[in-house]
Amino acid sequence: MTNTSGDPAENKLDATPDELLEANRERGDGSFETGRMIATFRAGAFDEGVHSLRAAGLRVVDARDFAGQVVAAAELEQADALALPLVGAAIVTGTAAAASGISAQSDYAQESPIAVSQPERFASVTQAAADGTFSEYLRGFVQAAETIARGFRGTSPQVDEAQVQVLGATWGLLTCQVPQSAQTGGGISVAVLDTGLDLAHPDFAGRQVTSETFVGQPVQDLYSHGTHCTGTACGPVDPPDSTPRYGIGDQASIFPGKVLSNSGTGATGSILAGINWAIANGCEVISMSLGGRSSVQAAYSAAGEAALNSGLLIVAAAGNDGAQTGAPANSPSIMSVASLDQDTLTPSSFSNFGKIDIAAPGRDVFSSVPMPARYATMSGTSMATPHVAGCASLWAQTSPNLRGMDLWRKLVSTAKSLPQPASRVGAGLVQAP
């Protein structure tokens, strides 16, 4: 049951998110689904699950067979399924899923190694629109389809002009008490799963950076979003000239994983592959400023549990729809981050609500972007999330015991209480140690 070059994108494991999105646009079914399936295995049943897929005639690529659990696109060309052992799930092509009876269901027999199977869905950056009133996920989904249809060539979106002020630090860092902290994030690894990083950005020169791509495009960030989020989480303590300090874990090791394409679009499979890689590399903090509007996805919940069990913590953006928290942040095992406005420290108008664990500065956040712009100001729960990730790296540095769920508990127990309900701000405003 192997694929051929003439197959639709949903029958290719090496299809990029942009190719999947273009195929979705051509189908015109109005769904946010790629056409592939995600099978989540029962706890402890990964090997049995892989065996069952192979017994059904599927050619399964097991990430354990590759260095760092990173599977090259060429290895996926003729495969029907990609199995990710550290998150306990597999991505299955559309035709292979149909032929082997893997459909959207959660009622597998108890003896089946598969617990749940769900359609693979698209995800997007969670940066807010300029006026904070329009869902970036929906806007990004439409714009990405339009740019692909025109022949996308990796141009960067427009970003606000940076209003650089002579300050000791950005408002977000000041509010989170970062400048007062003696911690630097040294010895802690922070994975930023996003649109990549400007690897030539001078503010990251000399830093320990380990990068990987999961979308068939170079890690180099052509969208700006990933570089901006990385800057907040791990930027320098003393940027040049009169630039305010905008980074938190300035000595943390940086692991940029490109799970969203240069159009700002990804899919469940690419994100799970990035999480699997981050877990394999022992990244104590995994930051994901991405998501989409959907119910809880079993594979994300399993990935979050796997990370916690490995002493790692995933933090994710709640989303910018002004609606219920989307996936993956709505999973109980992933820390959901809401956005706050400056001065009032009230929830941003765009910030989602419901399953919220903690809040952080998200409106008008200054950080790094690819050269030559170098810096820019953006808004969104995307911008709030790396504030939490950066503070998490500082807390993790204070004690080897603050890992996984213990790190989660420390972040929420030390958060500054806010007068809004927990459904809007969770435990409150994240604070540095």
Image (spheres, rainbow, N blue to C red):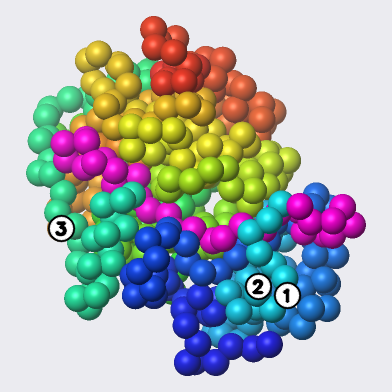
| For discs 2 and 3, the disc positioned in front in the rendered view | 2
The correct choice, above or below, for 269 with respect to 23 in the image is: above
Using the rendered image of the protein, determine whether residue 304 is visible from the camera's viewpoint. yes
Q: Nearer the viewer, residue 230 or 296?
A: 296
Q: Which mark is residue 97?
A: 2
- Amino acid type, mark 1: Ser
- Amino acid type, mark 3: Pro
The residue at 82%/71% (across/down) is 52
Q: Position of residue 322 (x, y in %)?
A: 33, 32
The residue at 30%/37% (across/down) is 380
The correct choice, above or below, for 133 with respect to 212 in the image is: above
Stretch in magenta: 107-136
Using the rendered image of the protein, determine whether residue 199 is visible from the camera's viewpoint. no
Q: Quadrant of the N terminus?
A: bottom right
Q: Would you say 200 lies left or right of 93 here?
A: left
- Amino acid type, mark 2: Ala
Residue 259: image quadrant is bottom left
The residue at 38%/73% (across/down) is 27
The reply to whether dot 2 and dot 1 touch (C-beta < 8 Å) is yes
The residue at 78%/69% (across/down) is 50
Which residue is at the far right? Answer: 111
Decide: few, some or many residues near mark 2? Use Cα within 10 Å; few <14, some 14-19, many ≥20. Answer: many
Q: Position of residue 99 (x, y in %)?
A: 69, 78
Say which element carries label 3.
loop
Decide: few, some or many residues near mark 1? Use Cα within 10 Å; few <14, some 14-19, many ≥20. Answer: some
Q: Which mark is residue 66?
A: none
Comes first in the chain, label 2 or label 3: 2
Comes first in the chain, label 3 or label 1: 1
**Residue on which the image places disc 1:** 100
What is the distance, in whole Å, between disc 2 and disc 1 at their CAs?
5 Å
**Residue on which the image places disc 3:** 372
